[in-house]
DNA sequence: GTCTATAATACGATAGAC
DNA sequence: GTCTATCGTATTATAGAC
């Protein structure tokens, strides 16, 4: 794998919060009502960011039901009532978090270009997704938890935003199939397979570390994973 | 895909419970102590099976923390104290369930034969795992939930049983690599990829149905999945 | 905006009659 | 073995002082 390819991967932010343009959806109702532009105070912005960061930590570890406001408040260095001053309920925090992270989560797929070479485009997508599993495992587990439970909080987002994006990008893959560059198949399953294989390294981290006997801070298997997945998707696994 | 191959797949039981040899681990302490053989009564066997079936339904849907004894008791058509007569705690039920189902869950991998053809063996493994996702999605989600939370209840089982089995079967794949039939790679990642892609159809069912616009009882996409995954792993996705 | 105190309920587990 | 009743605790959310 060339360094040129690696360098072309978009940078992944260390934290997804703290952007000045932050909007948390339901929290807007508390902004000044008399003004046309709902402007957030500096303390609002930083505290909401602290809460969402804490919530990501706790929700991704324990799931929605397993997480408690106590733990989130402690992680955010805040009292529980103060936390509920910024978000009106536990569910509110969860939805705000998922909504805020969905764009980040789908960014790699957005980068899929119709005019690129199929091998190059798929390789880049795999690398980018794998990099996100390595660097943002909490986000991966947050979504895995939510979808596993039936996506009760982001069901509509899946049926609209996700549906639109996937089918738009599936059309690109279909064009490669029509051009004879890929075998005939439902192109959406190509996307499913890339999601599954890459996110597996974040979501099933404990299992993988058990099998590979890797310590918690050892991420050396990600290099093997990238090499293997590239081999697999480029059709070079089985040989004649 | 030939019918011969399909027919060679081992049958998957509709329910994993009710076997007369049922042992639930901690529940043994209540058996007659004075006798050498801890014999379970008929009512014990049927009730424990009913509880485990109900627990599978509830745990797989809501996760360990999200599940309540009330819901399990209702599903088992039993009072809550009566349920706790057979299992001493909620955690007990969960561990008994996971332990009982682990063998079933790993059965497809056990079938991997060293003397078979790599293409044939991998195809069979994929088909068997995919069939389990289709027919036993609750079991898939039960394990996904558990591993996602750090495998707090079956950590030791992963580090022993799973480690042993995977590395034993990885040796078979390694022998295929050594024979030049597969590309050089860490063979354990081959297993990870098959787990990830097949279990994805059970664990992320809601997401897949959102993208494909499939109703809850529509399983027609599994045929596409099998065709695609076979194409992918047989190295026939990308074409020159 | 932040806090202490507390209301209101959900839940795991037990007591004790039958 | 099964039940009703209940204990004790954890947890979400609110009240109201500052």
Image: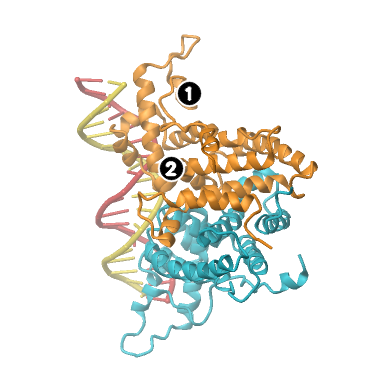
Chain colours: A cyan, B orange, C red, D yellow
Q: Which residue corresponds to the image point at 43% horizontal and 47% vertical from the top-left?
A: B63
- The residue wearing badge 1 is B23
Residue D2 located left or right of residue A132:
left
What label sits on residue B61 in the rendered view?
none
Residue A216: x %, y % from top left: 67, 51
Q: Are marks 1 and 2 on the same chain?
A: yes
SS at mark 1? Answer: loop
Residue C13: x %, y % from top left: 39, 34
The image quarter containing residue B77 is: top left
Figure quadrant of the N terminus of chain B: top right
The image quarter containing residue D13 is: bottom left
**Which badge, 1 or 2, comes first in the chain's sequence?**
1
Judge the density around disc 1: few (<14), some (14-19), many (≥20) Cα neighbours within 10 Å: some
Q: Which residue corresponds to the image point at 67% horizontal and 48% vertical from the top-left?
A: B189
Residue B149 appears in view: no
Q: Is residue A135 above or below residue A149?
A: below
Judge the density around disc 2: few (<14), some (14-19), many (≥20) Cα neighbours within 10 Å: many
Q: Chain of mark 1?
A: B
Q: Is residue B13 above or below residue A141?
A: above
- The residue wearing badge 2 is B138
Residue A189 appears in view: yes
Q: Is residue B39 above or below residue B238?
A: above
Residue A145: x %, y % from top left: 47, 55
Q: Chain of mark 2?
A: B
Residue C12 located left or right of residue A139:
left
Seen from this angle, which residue lies furthest top? B35
Residue A87: x %, y % from top left: 39, 69
Q: Nearer the viewer, residue A16 or A86?
A: A16
Q: Which residue corresponds to the image point at 38% horizontal and 56% vertical from the top-left?
A: B214
Figure quadrant of the C terminus of chain B: bottom right
């Amino acid at each position: 794998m060339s360094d040129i390819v690696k360098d072309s991967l978009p940078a992944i932010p260390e934290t997804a919060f703290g952007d000045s343009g932050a909007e948390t959806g339901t929290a807007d109702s508390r902004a000044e009502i008399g003004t046309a532009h709902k402007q957030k105070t500096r303390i609002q912005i930083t505290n909401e960011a602290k809460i969402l960061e804490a919530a990501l930590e706790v929700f991704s570890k324990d799931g929605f039901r397993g997480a408690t406001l106590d733990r989130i408040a402690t992680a955010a260095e805040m009292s529980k009532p103060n936390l509920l001053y910024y978000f009106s309920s536990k569910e509110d925090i969860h939805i705000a978090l998922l909504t805020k992270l969905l764009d980040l989560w789908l960014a790699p797929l957005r980068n899929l270009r119709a005019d690129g070479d199929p091998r190059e485009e798929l390789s880049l997508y795999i690398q980018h997704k794998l990099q996100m599993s390595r660097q943002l495992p909490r986000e991966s587990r947050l979504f895995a938890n939510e979808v596993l439970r039936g996506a009760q909080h982001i069901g509509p987002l899946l049926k609209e935003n996700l549906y639109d994006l996937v089918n738009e990008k599936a059309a690109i893959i279909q064009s490669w199939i029509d051009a004879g560059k890929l075998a005939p198949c439902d192109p959406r399953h190509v996307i499913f397979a890339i999601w599954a294989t890459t996110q597996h390294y974040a979501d099933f981290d404990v299992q993988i570390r058990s099998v590979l006997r890797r310590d918690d801070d050892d991420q050396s298997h990600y290099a093997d994973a990238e090499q293997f997945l590239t081999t697999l998707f480029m059709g070079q696994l089985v040989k004649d």
